[in-house]
Image (cartoon, helix red, strand yellow):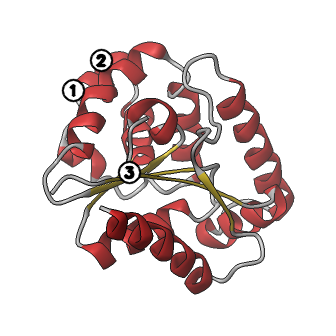
Amino acid sequence: MKFCVAIDGPAAAGKGTISRAVAAHFGFAHLDTGLLYRAVGMKGGDPAQAASTLCPEDLARPDLRSLAAGEAASRVAVLPDVRAALLTFQRNFAAREGGAVLDGRDIGTVICPGADVKLFVTASAECRAERRWRETGEGSLAEVLEQVRARDARDMGRADAPLCAAEDAITLDTTTLSIDEAVDKALRIVRAQLERG
């Protein structure tokens, strides 16, 4: 069975947590596409070359969840050559047997426009900054909020595959939801589509 769940949204909205939970619940494979861009950004050198030679070891780096890696990802993600180099990898992953969940910024709009389920997970910038600050323990809350807003502007304003909700995506605002509540809502949406066949 092939079944694709596309989960998009800005940084620290909860899409990674929700994606992992959905994949685990239904036994689907999971790909955090942001890790691909973080790994490319942290490899250094020519970003297009880094993207075309990405290997599993690059995705296992312990520093990929750092604020620096997030900033690096946002800088290389605007480059068309980088996006093109990673496109085939992501589409092949999405088309695998047994189901797949991909989370990122352009899964429902560019990578998998025909996904069976599209979710756009969001939250207020203040809420997301506090989550990221607690997660990383880096900088001050004000600095992280400034970084979140700058990253949103870059991600939404880029010419190639900007961050936006697909027209047929279901928006899930996690600002006031607990993790369990957000996951439960996502599971219900995916389950309903699976039952429709």
Residue found at x 63% / y 16%: 159
Residue found at x 67% / y 73%: 134
- Measured from the top left, where is residue 119 in percent x and y? 54, 55
List the residue tagged with mark 3. Answer: 116
Question: What whole-number distance in Å separates the C-alpha atoms at marks 1 and 2?
Answer: 6 Å
Picture quadrant of residue 133: bottom right
**Is the residue under label 2 in contact with that under label 3 (CB below 8 Å)?**
no
Amino acid type at circle 3 is Asp
Residue 161 shown left or right of residue 113 in the figure: right
First in sequence, mark 3 or 2: give its number: 2
- Measured from the top left, where is residue 54 in percent x and y? 24, 33
Residue found at x 74% / y 61%: 123
Question: What whole-number distance in Å separates the C-alpha atoms at marks 1 and 3?
Answer: 30 Å
Mark 1, secondary structure of its residue: loop
List the residue tagged with mark 1. Answer: 53
- Measured from the top left, where is residue 13 in percent x and y? 64, 61
Residue 9 shown left or right of residue 140 in the figure: left
Quadrant the N terminus occupies: bottom left
- Measured from the top left, where is residue 79 in percent x and y? 50, 17
Residue 36 shown left or right of residue 54 in the figure: right
Amino acid type at circle 2 is Gln
- Nearer mark to the viewer, of 3 and 2: 3
Mark 3, secondary structure of its residue: loop
Quadrant the C terminus occupies: bottom left
**Is the residue under label 2 in contact with that under label 1 (CB below 8 Å)?**
yes
Residue 138 higher or lower than 149, as above or below: below
- Nearer mark to the viewer, of 1 and 3: 3
List the residue tagged with mark 2. Answer: 49
